[in-house]
Protein backbone atom coordinates (compact mmCIF):
# COMPACT_ATOMS: atom_id res chain seq x y z
CA UNK A 1 0.00 0.00 0.00
CA UNK A 2 1.60 3.34 -1.05
CA UNK A 3 2.58 5.76 1.63
CA UNK A 4 0.47 8.93 1.66
CA UNK A 5 2.20 12.33 1.74
CA UNK A 6 0.90 15.13 3.90
CA UNK A 7 -0.48 17.95 1.67
CA UNK A 8 1.60 20.54 3.53
CA UNK A 9 4.74 18.45 3.03
CA UNK A 10 3.89 18.03 -0.68
CA UNK A 11 3.72 21.82 -1.13
CA UNK A 12 7.03 22.21 0.71
CA UNK A 13 8.73 19.67 -1.56
CA UNK A 14 7.35 21.39 -4.67
CA UNK A 15 8.58 24.73 -3.38
CA UNK A 16 12.09 23.41 -2.76
CA UNK A 17 12.19 21.82 -6.22
CA UNK A 18 11.06 25.06 -7.85
CA UNK A 19 13.71 27.07 -6.02
CA UNK A 20 16.41 24.57 -7.05
CA UNK A 21 15.26 24.69 -10.69
CA UNK A 22 15.13 28.48 -10.68
CA UNK A 23 18.60 28.70 -9.12
CA UNK A 24 20.04 26.30 -11.68
CA UNK A 25 18.43 28.24 -14.51
CA UNK A 26 19.80 31.54 -13.24
CA UNK A 27 23.31 30.13 -12.84
CA UNK A 28 23.18 28.65 -16.30
CA UNK A 29 21.96 31.89 -17.80
CA UNK A 30 24.59 33.96 -15.98
CA UNK A 31 27.36 31.68 -17.24
CA UNK A 32 26.17 31.88 -20.87
CA UNK A 33 28.20 34.33 -22.92
CA UNK A 34 26.25 36.77 -25.04
CA UNK A 35 27.63 39.16 -27.65
CA UNK A 36 26.48 42.73 -27.01
CA UNK A 37 28.46 44.63 -29.68
CA UNK A 38 30.88 44.01 -32.53
CA UNK A 39 33.11 46.55 -34.25
CA UNK A 40 35.68 46.57 -37.08
CA UNK A 41 38.30 49.34 -37.23
CA UNK A 42 40.26 49.23 -40.53
CA UNK A 43 43.36 51.37 -41.07
CA UNK A 44 46.49 51.32 -43.20
CA UNK A 45 48.57 50.39 -40.13
CA UNK A 46 46.46 47.53 -38.82
CA UNK A 47 42.84 46.43 -38.57
CA UNK A 48 41.18 45.84 -35.22
CA UNK A 49 38.11 43.65 -34.65
CA UNK A 50 36.40 44.03 -31.27
CA UNK A 51 33.93 41.53 -29.84
CA UNK A 52 32.15 42.87 -26.76
CA UNK A 53 30.33 40.44 -24.49
CA UNK A 54 28.58 40.26 -21.15
CA UNK A 55 31.22 37.90 -19.70
CA UNK A 56 34.84 37.03 -20.48
CA UNK A 57 35.12 34.97 -23.67
CA UNK A 58 37.08 31.74 -23.92
CA UNK A 59 38.48 31.06 -27.39
CA UNK A 60 40.92 29.14 -29.59
CA UNK A 61 42.56 30.50 -32.75
CA UNK A 62 43.96 28.89 -35.90
CA UNK A 63 45.70 30.23 -39.01
CA UNK A 64 44.76 28.40 -42.21
CA UNK A 65 45.77 28.73 -45.88
CA UNK A 66 44.12 28.37 -49.29
CA UNK A 67 42.47 30.74 -48.74
CA UNK A 68 44.33 32.68 -46.04
CA UNK A 69 42.09 32.96 -43.03
CA UNK A 70 42.07 33.32 -39.28
CA UNK A 71 39.64 31.00 -37.51
CA UNK A 72 38.48 31.72 -33.96
CA UNK A 73 36.31 29.28 -32.03
CA UNK A 74 34.50 30.91 -29.10
CA UNK A 75 33.28 28.58 -26.36
CA UNK A 76 29.99 28.67 -24.48
CA UNK A 77 28.39 31.08 -26.93
CA UNK A 78 25.17 31.03 -28.90
CA UNK A 79 25.08 33.02 -32.13
CA UNK A 80 22.76 36.01 -31.85
CA UNK A 81 21.75 38.78 -34.26
CA UNK A 82 24.43 41.13 -32.90
CA UNK A 83 27.23 38.75 -33.77
CA UNK A 84 25.70 37.91 -37.16
CA UNK A 85 25.90 41.62 -38.01
CA UNK A 86 29.69 41.53 -38.10
CA UNK A 87 29.60 40.19 -41.65
CA UNK A 88 28.28 43.56 -42.86
CA UNK A 89 31.01 45.65 -41.18
CA UNK A 90 33.90 44.80 -43.51
CA UNK A 91 34.78 47.69 -45.82
CA UNK A 92 36.04 47.19 -49.36
CA UNK A 93 39.04 49.44 -48.65
CA UNK A 94 40.16 47.39 -45.63
CA UNK A 95 43.75 46.39 -46.54
CA UNK A 96 43.71 43.20 -44.45
CA UNK A 97 40.21 41.71 -44.27
CA UNK A 98 38.50 40.33 -47.36
CA UNK A 99 35.36 39.10 -45.62
CA UNK A 100 34.09 37.74 -42.31
CA UNK A 101 31.88 34.71 -41.78
CA UNK A 102 30.32 33.56 -38.52
CA UNK A 103 28.27 30.50 -37.67
CA UNK A 104 27.18 28.15 -34.91
CA UNK A 105 29.85 25.43 -35.20
CA UNK A 106 28.18 23.22 -32.59
CA UNK A 107 25.76 23.66 -29.69
CA UNK A 108 28.41 25.31 -27.51
CA UNK A 109 30.76 26.94 -30.01
CA UNK A 110 30.54 29.86 -32.42
CA UNK A 111 33.15 29.92 -35.19
CA UNK A 112 34.40 33.24 -36.58
CA UNK A 113 36.29 33.06 -39.88
CA UNK A 114 38.23 36.10 -41.11
CA UNK A 115 39.35 35.73 -44.73
CA UNK A 116 42.47 37.79 -45.38
CA UNK A 117 43.79 39.83 -48.28
CA UNK A 118 47.40 39.38 -47.20
CA UNK A 119 49.50 37.54 -44.64
CA UNK A 120 49.07 38.96 -41.16
CA UNK A 121 50.41 38.59 -37.66
CA UNK A 122 47.30 38.31 -35.47
CA UNK A 123 47.42 39.58 -31.90
CA UNK A 124 44.46 38.49 -29.77
CA UNK A 125 43.82 39.53 -26.19
CA UNK A 126 40.98 40.19 -23.77
CA UNK A 127 40.09 43.36 -21.86
CA UNK A 128 38.19 43.74 -18.62
CA UNK A 129 35.21 46.12 -18.41
CA UNK A 130 36.03 49.83 -18.22
CA UNK A 131 34.00 53.00 -18.77
CA UNK A 132 31.00 52.11 -20.96
CA UNK A 133 32.68 48.97 -22.33
CA UNK A 134 31.97 45.45 -21.10
CA UNK A 135 34.32 42.48 -21.59
CA UNK A 136 36.15 42.66 -24.91
CA UNK A 137 38.00 40.19 -27.10
CA UNK A 138 40.31 42.21 -29.36
CA UNK A 139 41.69 40.87 -32.64
CA UNK A 140 44.48 42.99 -34.12
CA UNK A 141 45.74 42.12 -37.62
CA UNK A 142 49.21 43.45 -38.44
CA UNK A 143 50.92 43.10 -41.84
CA UNK A 144 53.69 40.54 -42.20
CA UNK A 145 55.14 42.30 -45.22
CA UNK A 146 56.37 45.79 -44.38
CA UNK A 147 56.51 48.55 -46.98
CA UNK A 148 60.24 49.29 -47.12
CA UNK A 149 59.58 52.54 -48.97
CA UNK A 150 57.50 53.81 -46.05
CA UNK A 151 59.55 55.90 -43.62
CA UNK A 152 56.79 55.87 -41.02
CA UNK A 153 58.12 53.76 -38.12
CA UNK A 154 54.64 53.13 -36.71
CA UNK A 155 54.22 49.47 -37.73
CA UNK A 156 57.67 48.58 -36.38
CA UNK A 157 56.92 50.39 -33.13
CA UNK A 158 53.60 48.62 -32.69
CA UNK A 159 55.36 45.32 -33.31
CA UNK A 160 57.94 46.10 -30.64
CA UNK A 161 55.21 47.29 -28.28
CA UNK A 162 53.25 44.06 -28.66
CA UNK A 163 56.41 42.12 -27.82
CA UNK A 164 56.83 44.23 -24.69
CA UNK A 165 60.08 45.68 -26.05
CA UNK A 166 59.33 49.40 -25.70
CA UNK A 167 60.19 49.54 -22.01
CA UNK A 168 63.79 50.60 -22.66
CA UNK A 169 65.08 54.16 -22.60
CA UNK A 170 67.07 53.70 -25.78
CA UNK A 171 65.89 55.41 -28.98
CA UNK A 172 62.89 53.67 -30.48
CA UNK A 173 63.50 50.60 -32.62
CA UNK A 174 62.84 51.16 -36.33
CA UNK A 175 63.59 49.10 -39.44
CA UNK A 176 65.34 51.94 -41.23
CA UNK A 177 67.18 54.85 -39.62
CA UNK A 178 65.49 58.20 -40.16
CA UNK A 179 67.64 60.67 -42.09
CA UNK A 180 67.16 64.10 -40.58
CA UNK A 181 67.71 67.40 -42.37
CA UNK A 182 69.72 69.55 -39.96
CA UNK A 183 68.24 72.68 -41.51
CA UNK A 184 64.68 71.73 -40.65
CA UNK A 185 62.70 71.57 -37.43
CA UNK A 186 60.83 68.26 -37.07
CA UNK A 187 57.32 68.71 -35.67
CA UNK A 188 55.18 65.73 -34.65
CA UNK A 189 51.45 66.32 -34.21
CA UNK A 190 49.48 63.88 -32.11
CA UNK A 191 45.68 63.89 -32.54
CA UNK A 192 44.45 62.30 -29.32
CA UNK A 193 42.43 59.09 -29.00
CA UNK A 194 41.16 57.23 -32.10
CA UNK A 195 39.64 53.91 -33.09
CA UNK A 196 38.06 52.13 -30.14
CA UNK A 197 38.76 55.17 -27.95
CA UNK A 198 36.46 58.09 -28.93
CA UNK A 199 37.77 60.45 -26.27
CA UNK A 200 35.28 62.86 -24.78
CA UNK A 201 31.82 63.08 -26.38
CA UNK A 202 29.84 66.33 -26.39
CA UNK A 203 26.16 66.90 -25.79
CA UNK A 204 25.56 66.92 -29.56
CA UNK A 205 27.50 63.62 -29.90
CA UNK A 206 30.63 65.28 -31.26
CA UNK A 207 33.57 62.93 -30.70
CA UNK A 208 36.89 64.29 -29.53
CA UNK A 209 38.87 61.90 -31.72
CA UNK A 210 37.23 63.33 -34.86
CA UNK A 211 37.61 67.06 -34.22
CA UNK A 212 41.22 66.83 -33.03
CA UNK A 213 42.17 64.87 -36.15
CA UNK A 214 40.59 67.60 -38.28
CA UNK A 215 42.48 70.31 -36.38
CA UNK A 216 45.76 68.37 -36.66
CA UNK A 217 45.32 68.02 -40.42
CA UNK A 218 44.69 71.75 -40.75
CA UNK A 219 47.81 72.52 -38.72
CA UNK A 220 49.84 70.07 -40.78
CA UNK A 221 48.70 71.77 -43.99
CA UNK A 222 49.97 75.07 -42.60
CA UNK A 223 53.28 73.64 -41.40
CA UNK A 224 54.17 72.00 -44.72
CA UNK A 225 54.28 75.48 -46.25
CA UNK A 226 57.10 76.48 -43.89
CA UNK A 227 60.48 75.91 -45.56
CA UNK A 228 62.31 75.20 -42.30
CA UNK A 229 59.79 72.69 -40.90
CA UNK A 230 59.13 69.01 -41.52
CA UNK A 231 55.86 67.75 -40.08
CA UNK A 232 54.60 64.27 -39.17
CA UNK A 233 51.45 62.97 -37.49
CA UNK A 234 51.18 60.06 -35.08
CA UNK A 235 47.92 59.14 -36.79
CA UNK A 236 46.18 60.44 -39.90
CA UNK A 237 43.16 58.15 -39.71
CA UNK A 238 40.72 56.72 -37.21
CA UNK A 239 43.07 54.24 -35.55
CA UNK A 240 43.89 53.52 -31.91
CA UNK A 241 47.53 53.98 -30.87
CA UNK A 242 48.88 53.25 -27.39
CA UNK A 243 50.24 56.31 -25.58
CA UNK A 244 53.69 54.74 -25.40
CA UNK A 245 53.78 54.22 -29.17
CA UNK A 246 52.84 57.87 -29.77
CA UNK A 247 55.78 58.97 -27.64
CA UNK A 248 58.20 56.56 -29.29
CA UNK A 249 57.12 57.57 -32.78
CA UNK A 250 58.12 61.15 -32.00
CA UNK A 251 61.49 59.92 -30.73
CA UNK A 252 62.00 57.62 -33.73
CA UNK A 253 61.36 60.54 -36.10
CA UNK A 254 63.96 62.60 -34.19
CA UNK A 255 61.30 65.18 -33.36
CA UNK A 256 62.28 68.65 -32.19
CA UNK A 257 58.85 69.18 -30.69
CA UNK A 258 55.69 67.20 -30.05
CA UNK A 259 52.16 68.58 -29.74
CA UNK A 260 49.30 66.37 -28.55
CA UNK A 261 45.93 67.85 -29.53
CA UNK A 262 42.77 67.28 -27.49
CA UNK A 263 39.33 68.73 -26.68
CA UNK A 264 38.70 68.94 -22.96
CA UNK A 265 35.68 67.69 -21.01
CA UNK A 266 34.44 68.30 -17.50
CA UNK A 267 31.45 67.34 -15.37
CA UNK A 268 30.11 70.93 -15.41
CA UNK A 269 29.00 72.24 -18.79
CA UNK A 270 29.67 75.89 -17.95
CA UNK A 271 33.45 75.27 -17.79
CA UNK A 272 35.13 76.56 -20.94
CA UNK A 273 38.35 77.82 -22.50
CA UNK A 274 41.61 76.65 -24.05
CA UNK A 275 44.52 75.25 -22.04
CA UNK A 276 48.10 74.15 -22.57
CA UNK A 277 49.87 71.55 -20.45
CA UNK A 278 53.45 70.42 -20.01
CA UNK A 279 54.84 67.43 -18.13
CA UNK A 280 55.22 67.54 -14.38
CA UNK A 281 57.38 65.02 -12.52
CA UNK A 282 56.36 66.32 -9.10
CA UNK A 283 52.58 66.37 -9.12
CA UNK A 284 50.02 68.47 -10.95
CA UNK A 285 49.83 72.26 -10.84
CA UNK A 286 46.13 72.06 -9.90
CA UNK A 287 43.45 69.53 -9.03
CA UNK A 288 41.84 70.15 -12.42
CA UNK A 289 45.15 69.41 -14.20
CA UNK A 290 45.54 66.23 -12.18
CA UNK A 291 41.98 65.15 -13.05
CA UNK A 292 42.61 65.78 -16.74
CA UNK A 293 45.89 63.85 -16.73
CA UNK A 294 44.19 60.88 -15.08
CA UNK A 295 41.39 60.81 -17.65
CA UNK A 296 43.79 61.17 -20.59
CA UNK A 297 46.08 58.48 -19.22
CA UNK A 298 43.14 56.05 -19.23
CA UNK A 299 43.21 56.11 -23.04
CA UNK A 300 45.19 52.86 -23.22
CA UNK A 301 42.66 50.99 -21.08
CA UNK A 302 39.70 52.36 -23.05
CA UNK A 303 41.30 51.97 -26.48
CA UNK A 304 42.62 48.52 -25.61
CA UNK A 305 46.22 47.55 -24.95
CA UNK A 306 47.41 43.96 -24.64
CA UNK A 307 49.15 43.13 -21.39
CA UNK A 308 52.27 41.98 -23.24
CA UNK A 309 52.88 45.49 -24.53
CA UNK A 310 52.09 47.35 -21.35
CA UNK A 311 55.64 47.51 -19.96
CA UNK A 312 56.01 51.18 -19.20
CA UNK A 313 58.74 51.94 -16.70
CA UNK A 314 57.13 55.16 -15.57
CA UNK A 315 59.54 56.04 -12.79
CA UNK A 316 62.59 55.45 -15.00
CA UNK A 317 61.25 57.58 -17.82
CA UNK A 318 60.46 60.40 -15.40
CA UNK A 319 63.96 60.23 -13.90
CA UNK A 320 65.49 60.64 -17.34
CA UNK A 321 63.57 63.74 -18.37
CA UNK A 322 66.27 66.27 -19.12
CA UNK A 323 66.24 69.77 -17.70
CA UNK A 324 66.58 71.40 -21.11
CA UNK A 325 63.66 69.34 -22.47
CA UNK A 326 61.43 70.47 -19.61
CA UNK A 327 62.54 74.07 -20.06
CA UNK A 328 61.84 74.05 -23.79
CA UNK A 329 58.46 72.42 -23.18
CA UNK A 330 57.48 75.34 -20.98
CA UNK A 331 58.69 77.82 -23.61
CA UNK A 332 56.70 76.02 -26.32
CA UNK A 333 53.64 75.90 -24.09
CA UNK A 334 53.88 79.61 -23.33
CA UNK A 335 54.23 80.67 -26.97
CA UNK A 336 51.29 78.52 -28.08
CA UNK A 337 49.09 79.65 -25.18
CA UNK A 338 49.92 83.29 -25.88
CA UNK A 339 48.71 82.92 -29.48
CA UNK A 340 45.58 80.95 -28.56
CA UNK A 341 44.26 83.70 -26.30
CA UNK A 342 43.48 85.68 -29.45
CA UNK A 343 41.05 83.05 -30.79
CA UNK A 344 39.41 81.65 -27.64
CA UNK A 345 38.96 82.34 -23.95
CA UNK A 346 41.75 80.82 -21.89
CA UNK A 347 40.74 78.40 -19.17
CA UNK A 348 44.02 79.19 -17.44
CA UNK A 349 46.37 82.06 -18.32
CA UNK A 350 49.51 80.04 -17.58
CA UNK A 351 50.88 76.72 -18.77
CA UNK A 352 49.71 74.00 -16.39
CA UNK A 353 51.61 70.83 -15.57
CA UNK A 354 50.61 67.25 -14.77
CA UNK A 355 51.82 63.69 -15.29
CA UNK A 356 50.56 63.10 -18.83
CA UNK A 357 51.90 59.78 -20.15
CA UNK A 358 51.92 61.09 -23.70
CA UNK A 359 54.37 63.89 -22.77
CA UNK A 360 57.05 61.65 -21.31
CA UNK A 361 59.60 61.60 -24.12
CA UNK A 362 62.84 62.41 -22.28
CA UNK A 363 64.45 64.11 -25.26
CA UNK A 364 61.53 65.83 -27.09
CA UNK A 365 59.96 69.09 -25.85
CA UNK A 366 56.28 68.21 -25.59
CA UNK A 367 52.98 69.90 -24.80
CA UNK A 368 49.34 68.90 -24.70
CA UNK A 369 46.85 71.43 -26.09
CA UNK A 370 43.24 71.32 -24.94
CA UNK A 371 41.70 73.31 -27.77
CA UNK A 372 38.35 73.87 -26.03
CA UNK A 373 35.84 72.11 -23.78
CA UNK A 374 33.80 69.71 -25.87
CA UNK A 375 31.53 69.33 -22.83
CA UNK A 376 30.57 73.02 -23.11
CA UNK A 377 27.66 73.42 -25.53
CA UNK A 378 28.93 76.61 -27.17
CA UNK A 379 32.50 75.39 -27.51
CA UNK A 380 31.33 72.05 -28.86
CA UNK A 381 29.52 73.91 -31.64
CA UNK A 382 32.65 75.95 -32.37
CA UNK A 383 34.87 72.88 -32.44
CA UNK A 384 32.77 71.44 -35.27
CA UNK A 385 33.27 74.49 -37.52
CA UNK A 386 36.03 74.85 -40.08
CA UNK A 387 36.47 78.51 -39.09
CA UNK A 388 37.32 77.76 -35.45
CA UNK A 389 39.48 74.77 -36.37
CA UNK A 390 41.48 76.97 -38.74
CA UNK A 391 41.86 79.67 -36.07
CA UNK A 392 43.17 77.17 -33.54
CA UNK A 393 45.54 75.66 -36.12
CA UNK A 394 46.85 79.11 -37.09
CA UNK A 395 47.39 80.03 -33.43
CA UNK A 396 49.41 76.85 -32.86
CA UNK A 397 51.42 77.54 -36.03
CA UNK A 398 52.29 81.04 -34.82
CA UNK A 399 53.20 79.64 -31.41
CA UNK A 400 55.51 77.05 -32.98
CA UNK A 401 57.25 79.68 -35.12
CA UNK A 402 57.76 81.89 -32.06
CA UNK A 403 59.12 78.93 -30.09
CA UNK A 404 61.71 78.16 -32.78
CA UNK A 405 63.18 81.63 -32.22
CA UNK A 406 63.26 81.31 -28.42
CA UNK A 407 64.18 77.66 -27.75
CA UNK A 408 67.40 76.63 -26.09
CA UNK A 409 69.62 74.41 -28.24
Image (tube, grey):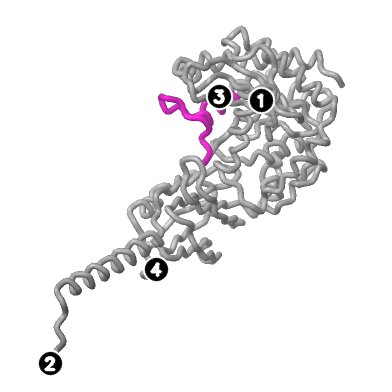
Q: Earlier in the sequence, mark 2 or mark 3?
A: 2
**Identity of the residue drawn at 59% across and 31% down:** 192
Q: CA distance from mark 2 to mark 1?
A: 88 Å
Give the numbered dot on residue 264.
Answer: 3
User: Tag 2: Cα neighbours inside 10 Å, few (<14), some, or many (≥20)?
Assistant: few
Residue named by callout 2: 1
**Relative depth, front residue between 110 and 62:** 110
User: Tag 4: Cα neighbours inside 10 Å, few (<14), some, or many (≥20)?
Assistant: some
* Residue 287 image-quadrant placement: top right
SS class of the residue under badge 2? loop
Q: CA distance from mark 4 to mark 1?
A: 48 Å
Q: Earlier in the sequence, mark 4 or mark 1?
A: 4
Q: Earlier in the sequence, mark 4 or mark 3?
A: 4
Residue named by callout 1: 368
Placement of 71 over or under 389, stated as above or below: below
User: Tag 1: Cα neighbours inside 10 Å, few (<14), some, or many (≥20)?
Assistant: many
Image check: 234 left or right of 203? right
Q: Is residue 335 visible?
A: yes
Residue named by callout 4: 108
Residue found farthest to the left: 1
Magenta residues? 196-216
The magenta stretch spans residue 205: yes
The image position of residue 374, as x and y in percent, is 50, 22
Amino acid sequence: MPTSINPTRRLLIKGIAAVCLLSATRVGFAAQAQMVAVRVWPSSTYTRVTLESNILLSYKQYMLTNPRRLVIDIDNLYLNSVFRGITTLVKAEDPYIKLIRVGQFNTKTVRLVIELKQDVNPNLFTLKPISEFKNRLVIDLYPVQKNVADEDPLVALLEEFNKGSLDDNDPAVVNQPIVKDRNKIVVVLDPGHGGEDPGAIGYYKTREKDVVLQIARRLRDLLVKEKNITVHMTRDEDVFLPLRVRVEKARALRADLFISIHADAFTKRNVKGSSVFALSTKGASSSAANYLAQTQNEADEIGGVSRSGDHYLDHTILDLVQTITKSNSMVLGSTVLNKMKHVNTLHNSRVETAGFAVLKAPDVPSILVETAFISNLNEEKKLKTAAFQNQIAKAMLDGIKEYVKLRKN
